[in-house]
Amino acid sequence: MSDSQYNWDEVWTDAAKIAHECSSKSELAKAMGIPRKTFVEAMKRYGLTITDLRLGSPTNLSEQSTLEKLRLQRQSLKKDLDTLQQELGRREWWREILLEVASTITPDYIAPPPLMPKPERSQTAKLMLSDVHLGQLTLSEQVGLFGEYNKDIAMARFRHTFTTFASIAKHQPFAIEEAIVVLLGDLVEHSHLRPGHEGFVDLNVVKQSLMISTSGVAGIRMLAGVFPKVRVVCVTGNHGRTASDPRLCDPTDNFDYLAYKVMEMALVDQPNVEFIIPESWYANYKVYSYNFFAMHGENIRSYVGFPWYGATRAARQYVAMFRLAQKRKIRDTNPQTREEFDACMIVPDYALLGHFHSDTTWESPDIEHFVNGSMPGVSSYGARRVMVINKPRQRMMFVHPKYGVTMRLPIDLDEVG
């Protein structure tokens, strides 16, 4: 039985009647028919001893337990208030630090190159980048040599992802007119995602955000020197939220969001770079006439492994919402040309997810789903508690003006770092 199934006022009344016949708490708990641990913890919580039960009358014990409960409730509420006040102060301090640092990042800007030849065959290169978990500490002794991870390995794999994406894209037999980087969240690991999580990080969250922002600026700036146009689409993850309870945070109350804003501020004068940072948990954007829908995916529940059903169902719910908005947009704008009609279309053709650390794809009748991998591949928590063990990798693809997504390529990272 759970603690809540006992009426402790009645328990103490009955215990007082027989306490003089018992020599210990264990014997008294046995006589009452209550598990020893539950009984002893309840005595501690109500501030009672075996002597109190032997000497006190049932009425006095009932009154004493009621007063003790009120006192403990008052202590708990005061502790919660102090914790919330401290957390509010820390959040404001972190925001001020990150915004101050963002104002100091002033890279030298370079002129974008001219459009590559063969524009009639041009495509768009797209990189899905997520679940870096910078700051995660995974010791090789815990998961084997395959799964070792720390801030140095994270940064090596982060840089390798950008350079490999650029190298593969620019060596295709067709021109690349635009590169799109979709940042799907969990760039940082944080430290208070769950109780005791501080022991699984090697870098505090402020330093995590600063390091990932600086490296992100360098990677995007490198792409700006290779491709005529670079678009960066950003959604936040669950590891970056500023409170352990997701119900207390909106999508912008997140260190991923701050990292994105730092990158955007640092590259504001780079003429061929555009950032899309919605104040929402999802992002909609177009590539040619194709609609893409991106979100991290932490709100999708898993069942028996990967959430095939949950992810498909979530996409269908969003499609229904977007379809209603699309009808309203068409009704309000009354498009007269094909271009005007295409501008009203927001129902997605492709859905992009992170969070699940599994590089995979599947198709519905009208939507193709892509899920990105992760950079760690495995963590101590994942290996022990939820059995999430995957090869570290990220995903890239190409989008054709007529045929939509064409090539789909993994970027393997297990040998990097």
Image (cartoon, helix red, strand yellow):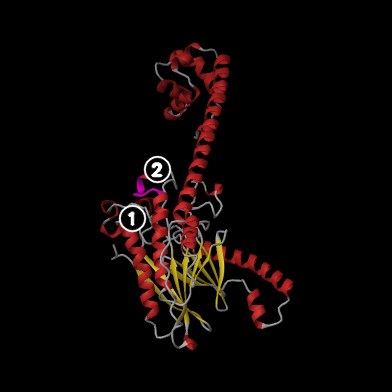
Instruction: Please tell me whether residue 200 belongs to the stretch shown in magenta.
Output: yes
The picture places residue 227, in percent across and down from the top left corner, at 43, 76
Q: In this view, does 246 lie above or below 72?
A: below
Amino acid carrying mark 1 in the image: Lys
Q: What element carries label 1?
A: helix
Residue matched to label 2: 196
The picture places residue 76, in percent across and down from the top left corner, at 52, 31
Amino acid carrying mark 2 in the image: Gly
**Front residue (pair 267, 237):** 267
* Number of marks: 2
Tell whether 163 sits left or right of 361: left
Q: In this view, does 28 lie above or below 340?
A: above
Instruction: Please tell me whether residue 284 belongs to the stretch shown in magenta.
Output: no
* Farthest top residue in view: 55
The picture places residue 365, in percent across and down from the top left corner, at 56, 75
Tell whether 155 sits left or right of 35: left
Residue matched to label 1: 151
Point out the image quarter for the C terminus: bottom left
Q: Give the range drawn in magenta.
A: 199-204
Residue at image point 47% right, 13% down: 54
Q: Which of marks 2 and 1 is nearer the N terminus?
A: 1
SS majority, magenta: loop
Q: In this view, does 239 lie above or below 294?
A: above
Q: Is residue 391 visible?
A: no
The picture places residue 292, in percent across and down from the top left corner, at 54, 71
Give neighbour class at mark 2: few <14, some 14-19, many 20+ (Cα, 10 Å): few
**Front residue (pair 264, 3):** 264
Q: What element carries label 2?
A: loop
Q: Can residue 398 be seen in this view?
A: yes
Residue at image point 36% right, 49% down: 201
Give neighbour class at mark 1: few <14, some 14-19, many 20+ (Cα, 10 Å): many
